[in-house]
Amino acid sequence: MPHKCIMSVDIGSTYTKAAFFKLEGRDSCVIAQESVPTTSDDVSKGFFLAEKELFHKTGLMAGKVYFSSSARGGLKIAAMGLVSGLTLAIAKLVAASAGGKIVGSFSYGLTAHDIEKLKEWEPDIVLMTGGTDGGHESLTLKNAGMLAAARLPASIIFAGNNRIQEKVAGILSDSEVYFADNVMPEVGEVNIEPAREIIRRIFINKIVDGKGLSALIKKVGNPPKPTPLSMFELVGKLPLYGTEWDNVCVVDMGGATTDVYSNTETASVNSAVVLKGIREPRLTRTVEGDLGLRVSAGSVTQSAENQVKKALSSGGLEWLRFCEYVLHVTHKTDALPRNREEREFDRILATACLTVSLMRHAGRTRPVWTSNGTVLVQRGKDMRSVKKMIGTGGFLALERDACVYDRALKKETLKDEEEVLLPERPEIYADAEYLLPLLGNLACDFPEETAMLAIQSLEPIQKAA
């Protein structure tokens, strides 16, 4: 009878990736990997095809199976809060850290235009936050009334002022509504885990509607995780490999989105810096739904038009030809570069994705003049202590040119002498074997082993002398 091993599978929109692992302390290893096209009519077909191919390669059978999925395009979440720098910021943290794709956000009171945007976005979940426990009520209740009247098919999670849960329940009695502990019970106190857990439960319920997944869950005995959640959990385990990995950043660049994960202290240790807004957790994720190399190529070009034009000019490339390429890959999302010019176009797009996503993930400081002299006010996460940066996803897993990172991390002082707190001279690595999502599925049950295998599989990218 064949020996058994642990199997990990990630079902993506285009490809289903799988691997067999031996996970036994320092003897842990990757036994074999396989990738097959995702069978969109019934995703279980691709799953079992990958398992069959691994059996042919190794003669082994899958024992325990772990899997993740982004095959529905991810779990779409709309975030709502009262104050943009407080409850709304926390709502975004909750959604992103649970593996969701934030399709939009709102602060203060909803408007009729906001409701129309929600209908257009068709989120799976509307995450409502707002007010400390016993704090502000009127705007939150008004927003609940607007949602009730809209009759959205989305699940609604209320994670705001716990004193008004009964009132919210009454207003939303005709909706699918869940209640979690307040994400900010007191000003400055962040409590995201209860809402995260409800999002995970909703994901399992909704993803089962995908073709073939209910049968697959019954077969393997485990529900899937959102792929970004698996990655989030793995990034949290990387420091277990050694203290040199205590401050790390991972960028996962795809065709539609670019995700940035950082595991580092959030605030500056400089006593002259004043932190404004929430203190972000050490482990954070941001997902940029308008930044990607294929589906989102047009919006990337708009977001970084000046940077793109400058790169084209310095490389002797034509703007019109670039726009034609962007139009081509937006409509043919499986397109690969056909020549040197198109490879350079992809590199310019990737640099723009990397630049904008890191700018959005990182915090900022700006000088403020007071009666006691000048102080620096910081919002968001200080990433200057990040010393290791990992690129994954189709392009970054294959890229070996450190110039892409160098250009994205180039420091610029913005208006009002504002400084973006980007990593300073980090070591760059590529997820060359594209193992991180698969290891992420195993990270909670095998933290030390997955951290070791992840880091040992990375390929350092040497910077030009």
Image (spheres, helix red, strand yellow):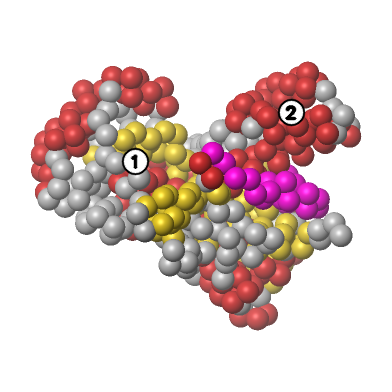
Q: Residues within 10 Å of mark 2 (few under 14, many from 20)?
A: some
Verify whether residue 257 appears in magenta: no
The residue lying at 59 percent from left, 77 percent from top is 243
Identify the element where label 1 is drawn. loop
**Quadrant that contains the C terminus:** bottom right
Vertical position of residue 98 compared to residue 62: above or below? above
Vertical position of residue 443 compared to residue 397: above or below? below
Q: Nearer the viewer, residue 386 or 331?
A: 386
Q: Position of residue 39 (x, y in %)?
A: 62, 37
The residue lying at 16 percent from left, 52 percent from top is 133
The residue lying at 69 percent from left, 34 percent from top is 307
Amino acid type shown at disc 2:
Lys
Question: According to the image, label 2 marks what residue?
Answer: 309
Give the spatial CA distance, label 1 vs label 2: 33 Å
Vertical position of residue 265 compared to residue 411: above or below? below
Question: According to the image, label 1 marks what residue?
Answer: 84
Q: Position of residue 42 (x, y in %)?
A: 56, 37
Q: Is residue 209 left or right of residue 44?
A: left
- Asked if one can make out residue 190 in the rendered structure from this viewpoint, the answer is yes
Amino acid type shown at disc 1:
Ser
Identify the element where label 2 is drawn. helix
| Residue at the limit of the structure toward the bottom, as seen here | 26
The label shown at residue 456 is none
Q: Nearer the viewer, residue 327 or 264?
A: 264
Q: Position of residue 78 (x, y in %)?
A: 38, 36
- Rendered image quadrant of residue 129: top left
Q: Is residue 231 left or right of residue 156?
A: right
* Range of magenta residues: 393-415
Q: Position of residue 197 (x, y in %)?
A: 34, 55
Q: Is residue 437 left or right of residue 125?
A: right
**Quadrant that contains the N terminus:** bottom right
